[in-house]
Image: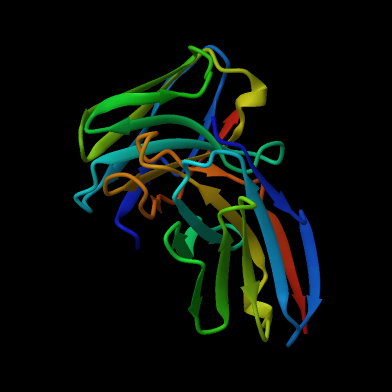
């Protein structure tokens, strides 16, 4: 089955700096890579996703890059703000496993004002 | 609101009790999921239902029993749980394969 590894487990940055979270996956059949943000006491919510036919996707301060050959993808947050502080989860899934997403173990991002 | 609701939001039960968690979605999704969230494993997939059929049982102990009577409802029946089963149980749904999952608010379960 799929195995997703996420690094780092914790990340602390100064407000205004950039933050990068990286994930690797094992199943070459995986073709959908979402990123979820979970604020304290709240449910995970999708912030950005990318499919395997695209190498990069950007939405304002958030971007995701995908390297299919190396089987890794990354989340980039620029100009970080205190409200970006949360746990971020990456996931990988394929259309061969009924949409089951395998999640990484999460990264706790702290943005210091 | 994401359209996925869970009840109850909090549950305290003894090890000999039987209880059920309920999840409901009105997003027209055809896949539903149960996750366990704890400090040990942040998002641990338990069960997946696609078109009301169980397609994934991720080595979950038999004291957890899922039920999906229709595409809008998902239950998790609990029986003789252990204290280590205390966690946040999250339900999610999605439309088809490889699409965004919408999560419910979760049920905070404490087993005494």
Where residue B18 sits in the image (x, y, percent)? 44, 17
Please name the residue shown 41% across and 25% down the image: B56
Q: Nearer the viewer, residue B43 or A78?
A: A78
What colour scheme governs how the chains and residues are painted in the rendered image of this protein?
rainbow
Please name the residue shown 64% across and 52% down the image: A70
Residue B84 in view: yes
Where residue B13 sits in the image (x, y, percent)? 53, 25
Q: Nearer the viewer, residue B86 or A103?
A: A103
Please name the residue shown 27% across and 49% down the image: B95
Residue B112 in view: no
Res B37 quadrant in image: top right
Where residue A28 sits in the image (x, y, percent)? 52, 42
Please name the residue shown 78% across and 59% down the image: A10
Compared to residue A20, the image places residue B51 above or below, namely above
Q: Is residue A102 left or right of residue B86?
A: left
- Residue furthest front in the image: A69
Q: Is residue B40 left or right of residue B8?
A: right
Q: Nearer the viewer, residue A68 or B3?
A: A68
Where residue A57 sits in the image (x, y, percent)? 49, 73
Image quarter (top left, top right, bottom left or bottom right) of the C terminus of chain A:
bottom right
């Amino acid at each position: 089955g799929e195995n997703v590894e996420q690094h780092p487990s914790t990340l602390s940055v100064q407000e205004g700096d950039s933050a990068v979270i990286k994930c690797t996956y094992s199943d070459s059949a995986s073709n959908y890579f979402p990123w979820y943000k979970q604020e304290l006491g709240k449910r995970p919510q999708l912030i950005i996703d990318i499919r395997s036919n695209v190498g990069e996707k950007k939405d304002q301060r958030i971007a995701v890059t995908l390297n299919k050959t190396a089987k890794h993808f990354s989340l980039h947050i620029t100009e970080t703000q205190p409200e970006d502080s949360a746990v971020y989860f990456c996931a990988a899934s394929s259309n061969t496993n009924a949409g089951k997403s395998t999640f990484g173990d999460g990264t706790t991002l702290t943005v210091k004002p | 609101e994401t359209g996925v609701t869970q009840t109850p939001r909090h549950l305290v039960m003894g090890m000999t009790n039987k209880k059920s968690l309920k999840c409901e979605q009105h997003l027209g999704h055809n896949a539903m999921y149960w996750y366990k969230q704890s400090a040990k494993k942040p998002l641990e997939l338990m069960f997946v239902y696609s078109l009301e059929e169980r397609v994934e049982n991720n080595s979950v102990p038999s004291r957890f029993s899922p039920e999906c009577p229709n595409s809008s409802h998902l239950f998790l029946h609990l029986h003789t749980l252990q204290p280590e089963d205390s966690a946040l149980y999250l339900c999610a749904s999605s439309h088809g394969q490889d699409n965004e999952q919408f999560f419910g608010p979760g049920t905070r379960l404490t087993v005494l």
